[in-house]
Amino acid sequence: MTATATQTFTILAADKLAQQGLDWIESQGDADLLNRPDLVELKKDKGQEAVDEEVGRLLAGGGVHAMVVRSGIKVTPAMLENPGDLKIIARAGVGVDNIDLQAATDKGILVVNTAEASTITTAEHAFALMISLLRNIGPAYKTMAAGGWDRAKFKGRQLSGMTLGVVGFGRIGQTMAKRALAFGMDVVAFDPVFNSPTALDGAVKMYTDFEEMLPHADVLSFHVPLNDHTRGMLNAKSFEKCRDGVFVVNAARGGVVDEEAIIPALDSGKCGGVALDVFTNEPPAEDTALRSHPKVLVTPHLGASTEEAQTAVSSDAAIACMAYLRGEGIKGAVNAGNLRVDLDPTQQGFVDLAGRMAALVSPMITRGIATVSIELAGRHLHKAAGTVERAAMVGLLREHLADPVNMINVAQVAETRGIKIRTATVDEPTQAGPALTIEVHGPDGSVDDSTHADDRTRKIVGRVYEDLKPRVVEINGYHMDMTPDGTMVLLQNEDTPGMIGAVGSAFGEAKVNIADMTISRRAAACGTSTALMTLKVDAEPPAELIEKLSATAGVLKIAVVKLPS
């Protein structure tokens, strides 16, 4: 996209932005500002429909090229029904839950955020929580404010010499680690897709197994997204792996630390103290023990709440909008934009297939990623190779990372984690037609024979036939013909009589309907047969059902994957 020298762009500030960001827009010779912070008040007074109608009217009239929002305005499909000249939506902040990404993508609108602008602020708050927790700042202040003086009661711990365990080693996690090192702490870190034994010039020992890292940390600080892989990752069971008296800091997302496990761990002495800036439900209940326990320090989600961060996110959002409109580049992209518009239906079908296949393999990755090998068989698919590669990497990494990953930034994300990507094209299709193969190799992993005895290598093969529907024809040596869509359950089990009945009964008792089931069997190298069930279900299985199946004799692994229909 290239802007003409005489073109002028209009940016709609649909939320209250810091004055510095507004001033920057007005200082640009090719930018006009449409400042409408009153839309937030309109939402409070008359509801979302009134905002949809007003913004929709502004967009449909044409002449609005970019829109900047914070968290006060929700961008809905109704608002974007006729987007006019709108090319980009910028979120002044990190989370984009208030923007319907699918609606924006369908209309060819780029969505960006300003995650980097609040990195330091969020890390600083986590660090402040840690040092305040270890030095009993909160209860000491309360005692002093009430007229008391009890020095002996509030004897704390020094940071120097302690070991910090950073959970999630993205931008914020690395910023936290650098500050801890400056205070004389030792640092270890967990990141499931960081392919290096150390980080920060060897100063940080890396782990790709969360529970393997736990015994090495005196303090745990969480910097991961909330998803099926991270929800409740520190719980009663994983607390048992920790050092006695471990301290816990969570300024990432509520729910990453199981709140029901906190108080028992504190009372038993397993946990020495907890500092929370985020909660499963915000605000937490007034009578919750998390507010009143003497070993808990709480703040009301202040991670990104500084004047500097709010100014920075507003300015960065405005700058990102103008850079894109001027054709100068893209920064902070959250959705895929229009990367696939030049592909024909078959090529686009393989791009879609790549994302689905990778999402199916992603839950199986528990020991990190060293190399991803992608092969497209069929000369007609060569043009789509780069886009297929990006779609596959997004599907592999998205659920493992706190930072947004998309088809625009995924190559850089993989590179910073030391992941090598090898994409090859073959002119001749396979005997059954064009095919896509994705292999994920863990550290020291290598391509094995058809039995895949090395469980650090994951292989999946798919095809797109004349009906343009995606098919998966092999997963880790299990052969099948399955359409990957909707909510799916992958269950590996010992190939013994009664397993299908036991699984079916469990789903029936939980009142979850199985819409389709594919079963494949293979003989392992040791001679013991195993089977893989892929089930399509009409509703997301409750956690209790998955836990019950995991504990069922003969069940080896189970994962739930949610794919587009």
Image: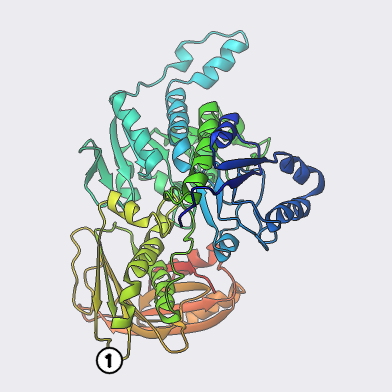
Which residue is found at the position 33% from the left and 62% from the top?
Answer: 365
Q: Is residue 468 visible?
A: yes
Q: Is residue 118 above or below residue 342?
A: above
Of residue 217 and residue 20, the one placed in the foreground of this image is 20
Of residue 97 and residue 29, the one placed in the foreground of this image is 29
**Residue 474 percent location from the top left of the image:** 33, 81
Is residue 454 shown left or right of residue 94? left
Q: In this view, does 198 lie above or below 249?
A: below
Q: Residue furthest right?
A: 46
**Residue 398 percent location from the top left of the image:** 42, 58
| Residue carrying label 1 | 431
Of residue 219 and residue 200, the one placed in the foreground of this image is 200
Image quarter of residue 356: bottom left
Which residue is found at the position 36% from the left and 35% from the top?
Answer: 175
Which residue is found at the position 27% from the left and 87% from the top?
Answer: 430
**Residue 329 percent location from the top left of the image:** 41, 50
Is residue 452 shown left or right of residue 390? left
Count of marks, rendered view: 1
Is residue 154 shown left or right of residue 190? right
Say how the picture is coloured: rainbow
Give the residue type at disc 1.
Gln
**Residue 116 percent location from the top left of the image:** 44, 40
Q: Residue furthest bottom?
A: 431
Q: In this view, does 123 lie above or below 549?
A: above
Q: Is residue 295 visible?
A: no
Which residue is found at the position 76% from the left and 55% from the top?
Answer: 53
Is residue 145 shown left or right of residue 521? right
Q: What element carries label 1?
A: loop
**For the residue carrying disc 1, how many other residues have a C-alpha within 10 Å: few (<14), some (14-19), or many (20+)?**
few
Q: In which quarter of the image is the C terminus?
A: bottom right
